[in-house]
Structures are given as C-alpha cells and as structure tokens.
Image (spheres, rainbow, N blue to C red):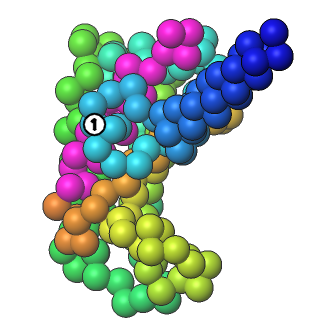
Amino acid sequence: MKKNIIIFIVVFVGYLIGNSIYLQMTKDPTPGKAKRLPCQKKVTTFERGFNNEDIKTAQELLKSGNVIFTSKAEKSIYAKSKLFGYISLEDTDKLFQEQLDKYIVEKKVQNKKLKVHYNIYENDVKDPGKKTKKSKLYAGYVWVEVRNDKNRVIYKVQIDFMDKKGGDIAQAIKCCIKSFATYNSTK
C-alpha cells in the first residue's frame, strides 16, 4: 500500500512539474502584444480599444471618408537622426492618406469627423534609458491614436518598423490602419 502511495505521489509531482514547464514554454512571453492579423505577427505590435460602440461609429466614419488626421515625426535625440534623411513626414502623410482611402466604401460628407493622430518615432539607440540589446533592434515605430467626438481616446495601436531607412514604414502604416478598421473587442 505504501509503495502505491509513493508511486502515485511521484507520478503526480512529475505531472505537475511537466505541466508547469509546458505552460511556461507555450505562454505568450509578451502579454498585451497584438497578434490578430498577419501583419501584427511580423513585428512587435501593441493595440488597445477603449469603447467598442465608439469604435464602431469611428469605423463607419472611416468607411464614409470622413477622416481628418494630424501627424508628427519624433527624431532621435541622443543618436544622430538618420531616418528622416530618407523619408519625410510629407511622404508618410501621403502613405497614410492612401491607406485611409482604401477603406472608403461610399463617400458621404458629414459634419462629424473621425479624428486620427499618427506619429513616426525614430528609435534612439543611444538613449540612456534603453539598456537591453532588444530595445535597440528596431528602427522605430508608427503609433496611431483615434479619438471620438468628445476628444477621448477610443483606440491606440503601435507597430514597429525595422528598416533604418524607413523602407517598411508603409507596411507599418498599412497595418495600423487595418488594425483599427478590423478591430472588434467583442470577438
């Protein structure tokens, strides 16, 4: 009887240890990172929605072409800025507008406008706050914020780009807009 109890305990403890190792190896090492879309899986992506009803309304405004956007470029401070020698904010504004236009189903002019702000951030690899090698791998990120008519943030997304010359910024912009256009927090 003692032998059976000892065998049961050893098997049970072995199961717990094995299950714990399996769960650690298969869990997402970076919670909060988005992986809904194929483009989000290629690079680090964060997204968050804050009010599904407002998001649905905003998506309808996108489909009707009632969008206004503002943009900003953040150059590196500690390291010499190089990215914006290859691409300008005017270039990214054109890319951004082209992507927005792809989601227009039927143009209907309305007084209510979708307010979108996007930012192109150049990774500052010499920033003293960046201590790990991983934090210096990406070239920068595109950050998009959508606000409702009360000027409250209803959706945010941030997608890294890797090319130091900005060659993949267009894909990051495309993915940001697709992320917003397809977002549904009730799934």
- Relative image position of residue 127 (x, y in whole percent): 53, 83
**Quick one: label 1, few (<14), some, or many (20+) residues within 10 Å?**
some
Residue 115 shows in this picture? no
Q: Residue at x 37, y 54 (%)?
A: 160
- Residue placed most toward the observer, 114 or 155: 155
Residue type at the position of mark 1: Cys
| Image position of 19 with respect to 98: above or below | above
Secondary element at image label 1: helix
Residue 138 shows in this picture? yes
- Relative image position of residue 16 (x, y in whole percent): 67, 27
Q: Residue at x 28, y 36 (%)?
A: 39
- Relative image position of residue 187 (x, y in whole percent): 50, 10
- Residue placed most toward the observer, 6 or 111: 6
- Asked if residue 168 lies left or right of residue 157, the reply is left
Q: Residue 155 sits in which quadrant?
A: top right
| Image position of 37 with respect to 159: above or below | above
- Relative image position of residue 70 (x, y in whole percent): 44, 50
Q: Residue at x 35, y 37 (%)?
A: 40
- Residue placed most toward the observer, 82 or 88: 82
| Image position of 76 with respect to 37: above or below | below
Q: Residue at x 32, y 23 (%)?
A: 65
| Image position of 69 with respect to 168: above or below | above
The stretch in magenta equals 168-187
**Is residue 123 highlighted in magenta?**
no
As drawn, which residue projects farthest toward the right? 2
**Is residue 169 highlighted in magenta?**
yes
Q: Residue 139 sits in which quadrant?
A: bottom left
- Residue placed most toward the observer, 41 or 112: 41
Disc 1 target residue: 39
Q: Quadrant of the N terminus?
A: top right
- Asked if residue 162 lies left or right of residue 21, the reply is left
